[in-house]
């Protein structure tokens, strides 16, 4: 809708890129805070964060390359980097892989998911503001909070034929922003309440995966097979693995807290 957020020194600042960078900055600030609160602040942690960022950026791009090329885009690295899309789900998978690979390369053995989880939640919430302002809104709705973009703005939204009809649309990205903010609050509250190290990130992945599968029905993305989008097909294959993991954890009693495990971080044991 608004590809240029503002102009500075004669140059237009792209809306989407601005909020992606703002999301990365927000995530790094939370990462810094969480690593300090947990007593894990170290150069090694920042090396792992760099690996996660690189892995996330690469797979976020790579996971949408096929669509860019299929729609007539040039199959060159320059064209893909400049004009290709990005996928949050692909970025999450890439960030996870990047962190794991980096930890193995530097020999870091401690769990880091608890430090990353709230940072990722707030980062996505911030970045999705740019998506709301520049991408397809959602499918038509009769709900009272449906959003009707102005006609001149709607005409410029890519892949959104319903945007020009003047009917209210699901503000799907606002749903996601609200969900990620709630997850951020929940993960912050859970900081000293889960006795299993590194579990917070798995909690986030499960929650986000379930939410994303559901919101895809009102986002208006292209259906690939079985009435589902590409993102939903990927989640349909991977979410059962996560669910199975948590079922095993619950059955084994892994989350039974003890007095020591429930002691708030920073408090005397």
Image (cartoon, helix red, strand yellow):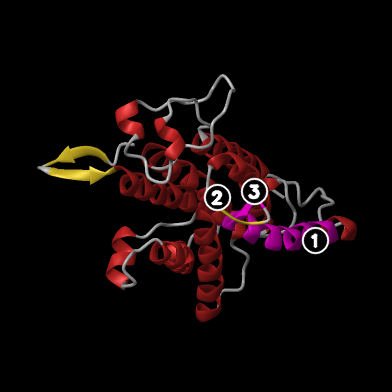
The residue at the point 50 percent across, 54 percent down is 88
Dot 2, crowdedness within 10 Å: few (<14), some or many (≥20)?
some
Question: Hey, which quadrant is residue 152 in on the image?
Answer: top left
The residue at the point 63 percent across, 65 percent down is 111
Asked if the residues shown at circle 2 and circle 3 are in contact, with their CB atoms under 8 angstroms apart, the answer is no
Q: Which residue is mark 3?
A: 213
Q: Is residue 76 left or right of residue 197?
A: left
Q: Magenta span has 150?
A: no
Up/down of 256 relative to 101, above or below = above
Q: Which residue is mark 1?
A: 244
Of badges 1 and 2, the one in the foreground is: 1
Where does the image place residue 117, in percent across and percent down from the top left?
58, 52
- Kindly give the residue lying farthest to the top in the view shown: 144
The Cα atoms of the two marked residues, 3 and 1, are separated by: 17 Å
Using the image as rendered, state which of residue 209 and residue 143 is in the foreground. 143
Up/down of 168 relative to 79, above or below = above
The residue at the point 47 percent across, 47 percent down is 123
Where does the image place residue 14, in percent across and percent down from the top left?
26, 45
- Name the element at disc 2: helix
Most prominent secondary structure in the magenta stretch? Answer: helix
Using the image as rendered, state which of residue 86 and residue 107 is in the foreground. 86
Asked if the residues shown at circle 1 and circle 2 are in contact, with their CB atoms under 8 angstroms apart, the answer is no
Tell me if I can see residue 49 in this picture: no
Q: Is residue 195 left or right of residue 177?
A: right
Mark positioned earlier in the residue sequence (1 or 2): 2
- Name the element at disc 3: helix
Q: Which residue is mark 2?
A: 37
Up/down of 56 relative to 100, above or below = above
Using the image as rendered, state which of residue 165 and residue 134 is in the foreground. 165
Q: Which residues are magenta?
A: 227-248
Using the image as rendered, state which of residue 174 and residue 71 is in the foreground. 71
Asked if the residues shown at circle 3 and circle 1 are in contact, with their CB atoms under 8 angstroms apart, the answer is no
């Amino acid at each position: 809708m608004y590809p240029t957020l503002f102009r500075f020194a004669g140059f237009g600042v792209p809306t989407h890129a601005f909020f992606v960078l703002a999301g990365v900055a927000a995530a790094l600030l939370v990462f810094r805070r969480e690593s300090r609160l947990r007593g894990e602040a170290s150069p090694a942690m920042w090396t792992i964060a760099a690996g996660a960022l690189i892995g996330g950026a690469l797979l976020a791009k790579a996971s949408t390359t096929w669509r860019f090329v299929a729609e007539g885009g040039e199959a060159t690295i320059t064209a893909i980097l400049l004009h290709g899309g990005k996928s949050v789900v692909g970025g999450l998978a890439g960030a996870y892989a990047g962190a794991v690979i980096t930890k193995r390369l530097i020999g870091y053995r401690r769990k880091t998911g608890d430090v990353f989880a709230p940072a990722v939640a707030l980062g996505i919430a911030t970045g999705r503001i740019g998506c709301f302002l520049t991408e397809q809104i959602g499918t038509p709705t009769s709900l009272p909070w449906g959003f009707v973009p102005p006609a001149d703005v709607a005409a410029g939204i890519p892949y959104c034929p319903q945007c020009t009809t003047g009917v209210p649309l699901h503000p799907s990205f606002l749903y996601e922003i609200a969900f990620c903010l709630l997850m951020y609050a929940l993960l912050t509250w859970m900081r000293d309440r889960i006795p299993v190290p590194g579990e917070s990130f798995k909690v986030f992945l499960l929650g986000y995966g379930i939410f994303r599968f559901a919101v895809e029905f009102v986002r208006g993305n292209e259906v690939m097979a079985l009435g589902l989008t590409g993102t939903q097909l990927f989640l349909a294959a991977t979410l059962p693995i996560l669910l199975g993991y948590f079922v095993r954890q619950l059955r084994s009693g892994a989350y039974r807290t003890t007095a020591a495990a429930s002691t708030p971080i920073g408090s005397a044991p």
